[in-house]
Image (tube, rainbow, N blue to C red):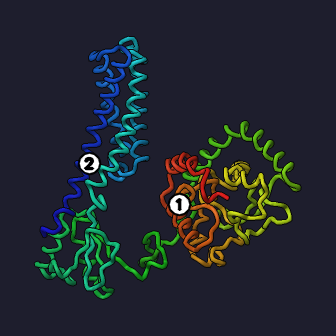
Amino acid sequence: MAGLTPLANKRRRRANLSAWAMSVDLVCISLAFVIASLFRAGEIDLDQVGRILLCTLPIYLGIALNNQSHHVKILLNGFKSAWRAGTAFAFSAAAMLLIAFFMKIGEDFSRLLFGFGTVFALILLTVWRNLLVRIGRRYLGESPFANLCIYDQVPRNTLSGEGSIDASAFGLSSPYPSDPVAVSNLAHVAQGMDRVIVHCQPAHRMQWASMLRSLDVPSEIVTPELTDLHPLGISHRSGQASLLLSGGPMPWTHRALKRAFDLAVTLPVMPILLPFLGIVALMVKLDSPGPAFFRQERIGLGNRKFHILKFRTMRVEATDANGDRSAARDDDRITRLGRILRQTSIDELPQFLNVLTGCMSIVGPRPHAMGSRAEDALFWDIDDRYWHRHSVKPGLTGLAQIRGYRGATEMKLDLTNRLQSDLEYIAEWSLLTDVRIILQTFSVLFHKNAF
């Protein structure tokens, strides 16, 4: 079993990485207040700095442990890692201020030192956590988890990764519970693993299932014939197993939270946005004859149609109500002003009104016209999962957009890349994801495919 030792050691390595993250977090916070003291007074005020750290560090640790700031999945994602650590420290700083207020000890420490220290700590934590992503990926290898894939008389999948073995090489070919040697071999192979995944012939699944149930490690058996059904999970009905194929809409709590977030973002910007929309609308009218706005049927929530609102960027006689023809880089239908509006994404701003009416969300899959095509094939003919992306409201921006998947869908791959991103967004939705996508959208507003 020596060949599996590096894989089994990943659990220890994850613990080490979390411990390093926690330790350096505390160093960063301590260093921040030392720097703040030097910045304010030109010397290290050990009394003030020590008093602040004595109160702040334990609170930070408690909050960071509670929000899983040091979990390996978080540590390997730069944005999430910095956000969780920054949030934990912000709350601990706020708690420190409340303690100082209620205990009337505000005069015992410098507010200026505390303010500078807080800012420096947030900066140092952000830099450190983003640096840790690179360190962690090198330290943990291809995957942070020890997932052991056992192949029993079936071809090995090239996507299995580093934890892939042939059952016969470890004395595990079609093991039986009545064979103590096979039971012992499987127990030793599984020791230290995070998960055991078995690939075997259908005829051997029952005996493998019996063996896997004896392990103290999460285990599963791959069933390739179910792949095309894209099940979300397993359920039970009338004493029989059934495949869960649709999760339905988001839970009402998530929907309410997402809607509240949409309104919290949209309502404050409307007083500034409406005058700007009026100015752009006037410019569109002056640039070419026709209405300032363009309304088009798009596919929305639950595959129900709605009318999206945009600034008109094409000549009226050349507009395409069904979206049968995608805009090209040198499209002769686009007006002079329309080209600028498209390149800057300003033509999409009227969709904030769609958000207000509830037809759209700030973040979600971009809505497509019914006639949209790639390689002259309708989107749903390319991939029948296309309809699944409409289980949430369409959005002004989305995961596909920040990944650079925007513009004309000339190739089928253009559609599948966007679809995969949309389905990933739906499966892993969180309010933090929406915030991250909004922030990253600003970096792709001016994109080579915006035309």
Whether residue 299 is visible here, answered yes or no, is no
Task: From the viewer's side, name the closer residue of 424 and 379.
Answer: 379
Residue on which disc 1 sits = 426
Task: From the viewer's side, name the closer residue of 418 and 183.
Answer: 418
What numbered label is drawn on residue 17? 2
Classify residue 368 by image quadrant. Answer: bottom right
Q: Amino acid at mark 1?
A: Ile
Q: Which quadrant: the N terminus?
A: bottom left
Q: CA distance from mark 1 to mark 2?
A: 30 Å
Outermost residue on the top side: it is 107
Horizontal arrangement in the rendering, residue 193 relative to residue 160 (left or right): left
Q: Amino acid at mark 2?
A: Leu
Whether residue 400 is visible here, answered yes or no, is yes
The percent position of residue 96, horizontal first and vertical second, equals 39, 24
Outermost residue on the right side: it is 289
Q: Residue at x 78, y 63 (%)?
A: 333
Q: Pointer 1: residues within 10 angstroms few (<14), some, or many (20+)?
A: some
Horizontal arrangement in the rendering, residue 2 relative to residue 121 (left or right): left
Q: Is residue 124 above or below residue 244?
A: above
Classify residue 126 by image quadrant. Answer: top left
Callout 2: SS: helix
Q: Residue at x 29, y 42 (%)?
A: 21
Q: Residue at x 23, y 64 (%)?
A: 193
The percent position of residue 269, horizontal first and vertical second, equals 68, 39
Q: Pointer 2: residues within 10 angstroms few (<14), some, or many (20+)?
A: many
The percent position of residue 216, horizontal first and vertical second, equals 22, 65
Task: From the viewer's side, name the closer residue of 288 and 37.
Answer: 288
The percent position of residue 429, horizontal first and vertical second, equals 51, 55
